[in-house]
Image: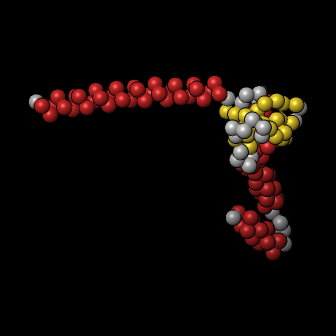
């Protein structure tokens, strides 16, 4: 967007016979600005995501429920360096060794229970609030 404007300004300066030093400085500032924006938009979030993925895989332990990159759900049985032995489905004979990098998501059984209890408490509180509001509304209608 600004590059054609800079080129037009540079062409106009060379047509006159002298090139303005301001034009070349502005051109380099613009190019450096593009590189900085590219870093903050593309590279930095990617590095952050890689660190999160690495932390997730390092915290992996036997008994965790996982989802693979291909969408299969299973339970981790054993971990040996970069290889994980996963049990898929209800069939106890379906144990497949796979690479740790193929794990997309990890869910620990204790975390799932905590989330369920939190939502059930919130639901009970919401129901109590709705009942109290309904009873107040009925009282006002009766008057």
Q: Residue at x 73, y 34 (%)?
A: 75
State the quadrant of the C terminus. Answer: top left
- Residue 94 in which image quadrant: top right
**Foreground pick, 30 / 96:** 96
Q: Using the image, determine if residue 9 lies above or below residue 93.
A: below
Left or right of residue 31, residue 89 in this image: left
State the quadrant of the N terminus. Answer: bottom right
Q: Using the image, determine if residue 37 lies above or below residue 112.
A: below
The total number of labels drawn is 0
Residue 141, image x and y in percent? 14, 34
Q: Residue at x 16, y 31 (%)?
A: 140
Residue 131, image x and y in percent? 29, 29
Q: Using the image, determine if residue 51 lies above or below residue 121.
A: below
Q: Residue at x 83, y 66 (%)?
A: 19
Residue 103, image x and y in percent? 76, 40
Residue extending farthest bottom: 15
Residue extending farthest left: 143
Residue 126, image x and y in percent? 38, 29
Q: Residue at x 67, y 29 (%)?
A: 108
Q: Using the image, determine if residue 49 lies above or below residue 42.
A: above
**Foreground pick, 97 / 128:** 97
Residue 90 in view of the camera: yes
């Amino acid at each position: 967007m600004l590059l054609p404007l800079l080129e037009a300004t540079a062409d106009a300066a060379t047509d006159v016979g002298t090139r303005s030093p301001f034009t070349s400085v502005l051109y380099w500032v613009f190019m450096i600005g593009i590189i900085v924006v590219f870093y903050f938009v593309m590279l930095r979030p990617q590095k952050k995501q890689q660190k999160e993925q690495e932390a997730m895989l390092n915290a992996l332990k036997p008994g965790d429920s996982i989802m693979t990159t291909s969408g299969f759900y299973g339970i981790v049985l054993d971990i040996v360096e970069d290889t994980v032995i996963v049990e898929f489905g209800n069939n106890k004979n379906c144990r497949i060794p796979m690479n740790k990098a193929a794990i997309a998501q990890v869910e620990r059984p204790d975390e799932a229970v905590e989330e369920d209890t939190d939502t059930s408490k919130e639901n009970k509180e919401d129901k109590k609030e709705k009942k109290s509001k309904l009873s107040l509304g009925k009282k006002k209608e009766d008057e």
